[in-house]
Amino acid sequence: MSPPQAPASPHDAHHPGIRRNLHQFVWQALQVALVGLVIGMERNVLPVVASHDFGVPPRSFVYLMAFVISFGLVKGALNFIAGRLSERIGRKPVLLTGWVAAIPIPLLIYFAPNWWWIVAANLFLGVNQGFAWSMTVTSKVDITRAEQRGLATGINEFAGYAAVGLAGIATGYLSHRYGPRPALLWFALAVIAAGLATAALFVRETLPWARAESHRHAQRQHTGPPPRFAQGLPAQPDSRAVFAFVSFRHPTFGALCQAGVANKVADTLLWVLFPLYLHEQGLGLVAIGWITGTYGLVWGASQLWTGPLSDRIGRKRPVVAGLWLLAAGVATVPLTHTMATWLGAAIVMGLGMALLYPNLIAAVADIAHPDWRSSALGTYRYWRDTGYALGALVLGLIAQARGALAPAFGFTAVLLLASGGWMAWRAEETHPRLPPR
């Protein structure tokens, strides 16, 4: 007679791995693509038509940047809130809340009598991106093995930022044909409806995978490379402890956070001032859409190999190289004067972003314990996306004080070079298979 079998643990059904969880992984990738389309629709059209359609006085750069400041402040704060909240109520409810928050965005843009309505619309955009995009990243990390995190975050950010680029191209054509307001209204409503419906019907809750991983570590049943979780927090830290530890107390986390800020300062430049600069050089909406869309598409598509690259060679070297490559592309823009060279600069900047962007996320996930990983990712994403607000304010003041856009490009290039130096000096390698130095 065979001995009685021990009852199955509730954690046994939640094993990580992309292939094992492929169906859910694909639905999560679709979610981030739809989230990317929502923010991407603003990347080309709004900065260019701000003066004509919404009454922004010419060369009032700080006023123009107010819509990015509002977005960055809200998204940064809600990234952290989303991380903590999802550890209590789950990832899916937070995701759905993000989609509901997106509904007012196209309506506010369509009916806007002035630019302050666009600023208000971007408050809702910050909620949408802070909740929805955060949960796509967290959910993929939940269901993925440690040695696949570069690939997982690369696919996630590929889907999101390829969609950002495609949205810029699509809305450029649609706005040229139908006008900016109708184009953005119907494009956004269709995307939001698709995102909300697929999230409600097909996305599964992934918090049980994180809890199962924590259980395996506690029982010493973990397989694969041993993780190097950052030491210095209790088993169940509160929000304040996680935020302070990731932001200031741990040198590698701190280096990752400052690199996140620098990359979003650069992205703010490329979101608002890059299309405006191209418009000042005589380019129309379609041509600007192709250049800014190329930046987004290269950024998105290249992450399919830059993420897996970090699974082989580590996170630190691609991040440092990405910061410096991005600096080179930014510095090139005001030095060139043809569409071909601006397209070349967009490709270089997209490659730089692709090298650093998914691998910063993977590095944070590498050394954060599963019990507080979502909060650590939320803290990193708080600092990273607050970079939108800081960048918008600083770059707007620089452009307004100098009466020109070129100095903002020079400042950003220097900031990126310095950030890469900080990362090279202070950060340890985080990949569990590779030595720290």
Image (cartoon, helix red, strand yellow):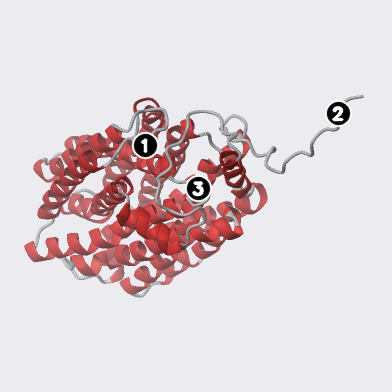
Considering every residue shown, the one lying at the far right of the view is 1
Q: Compare marks 1 and 2 and give the one earlier in the sequence.
A: 2
Q: CA distance from mark 1 to mark 3?
A: 18 Å
Q: What is the three-letter code of the residue carrying label 2? A: Pro
Residue drawn 29% across and 33% down?
A: 318
Q: What is the three-letter code of the residue carrying label 1? A: Thr
Q: Compare marks 1 and 3 and give the one earlier in the sequence.
A: 3
The residue indicated by pointer 2 is: 3
Considering every residue shown, the one lying at the far left of the view is 402
State the residue in front, 107 or 333: 333
The residue indicated by pointer 3 is: 138
Q: Are marks 1 and 2 in contact (CB under 8 Å)?
A: no
Q: Residues within 10 Å of mark 1 (few under 14, many from 20)?
A: many
Q: Is label 3 or label 2 in front?
A: 2
Residue 374, position as x, y percentages in the image:
48, 52
Residue 271 vertical position relative to residue 155 in the rendered view, above or below: below
Q: What is the three-letter code of the residue carrying label 3? A: Thr
Q: Looking at the figure, which quarter contains the C terminus?
A: top left
Residue 224, position as x, y percentages in the image:
52, 28
Q: Is residue 329 visible?
A: yes
